[in-house]
Amino acid sequence: MQTGILYALAAYLLWGLLPLFLKQLHGIPPTEVLLHRMVWSLVFLGAILAVRRHWRWLGAALHDKALLARFAASALLLAINWFTYIWAVNADRVIDASLGYFINPLISVLMGVILLRERLRLGQWLAVAVATCGVAWLTWQAGQLPWIALTLALSFGFYGLLRKTAQLGALEGLSLETLIFFPVAGGALAWLLGSGEAGFDTASSWVQLLCLMAGPFTAVPLLLFAAAARRLPLSLLGILQYSGPTVQLLLGIFLWHEPFSGAKALGFALIWAALALYTLEGWWTGRMRGRPANANQA
């Protein structure tokens, strides 16, 4: 349990600190950053697979058309999520990006209800309603939908839905996703570098090194998360999840001094209240269900 908590906190902390890494890539357009992230993630994951001599699954996966179609869809969603996040950080919208990952768990709940026919208890419905009020308030205050947050939440929510029923683990699944996109990403990056249009060509040596490190920065948190998921209950994993966007929010407010008005704080407060309500409702329900069994044992 303690090891799992450490793995989970390490994964979420790395995700929370990811804006610090992306902010260092001065002069590299978001599209090019995305290409570097795809290409060097595959190189890094390929090295791990080579060290572990873990290739047998790949042949079967490449001959399974249904599996390839599913992972092509998940790879596309992951690319949308990555690009939106990279763009938001470069555009000084870290707070808006953090909102997406606060909303994401509740988006996943709604997907479970709508697509998987899961049933919610009254307290869970109330949490979803409070979160909806928070999003509606932020929309009204801004005069437009919080599209950055919703794009991140929806893309990662559908990505999680596809991976929930996938036949491959975290390492194999991410490797296949990056492999599917490698012909496009590798070809586009090679063209940019060859034509002199790449920001990488004129960047400092430090920025170039960081571009090459995009693979480990992408893959390591996912692998830590997978290790944590095998050791922790989903309820505890879900509670720890909020540490990542909390770090992002604090960075946006205190390090980069992004605007965070009282009106925006109220919208965030409603969403935090919804998350707290959903978590407490689940904890209370689990405790009440366990009480009769404990009483009988006594």
Image (tube, rainbow, N blue to C red):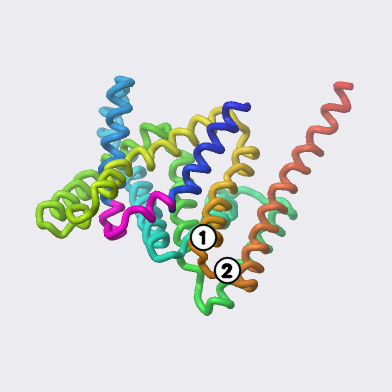
Q: CA distance from mark 2 to mark 1?
A: 9 Å
- Main SS of the magenta part reads helix
**Disc 1 crowd, CA 10 A, few/some/many (<14, 14-19, 20+):** many
Instruction: Please name the residue that numbered disc 1 is placed on.
Output: 252
Magenta run includes residue 110 = no
Question: Mark 2 belongs to which amino acid?
Answer: Phe
Q: In which quadrant of the rendered image does the N terminus lie?
A: top right
Please tell me which residue lies in front, 116 or 50: 50
Give the extent of the magenta segment.
20-34
The answer to whether marks 2 and 1 mark residues whose Cβ atoms lie closer than 8 Å is: yes
Residue 166 placement (x, y as % from top left): 43, 37
Residue at the outermost bottom position: 143
Instruction: Please name the residue that numbered disc 2 is placed on.
Output: 260
* Residue 99, image quadrant: bottom right
Residue 237 placement (x, y as % from top left): 60, 39
User: Is 173 left, or right, of 149 in this rendering?
Assistant: left
Q: Is residue 276 visible?
A: yes
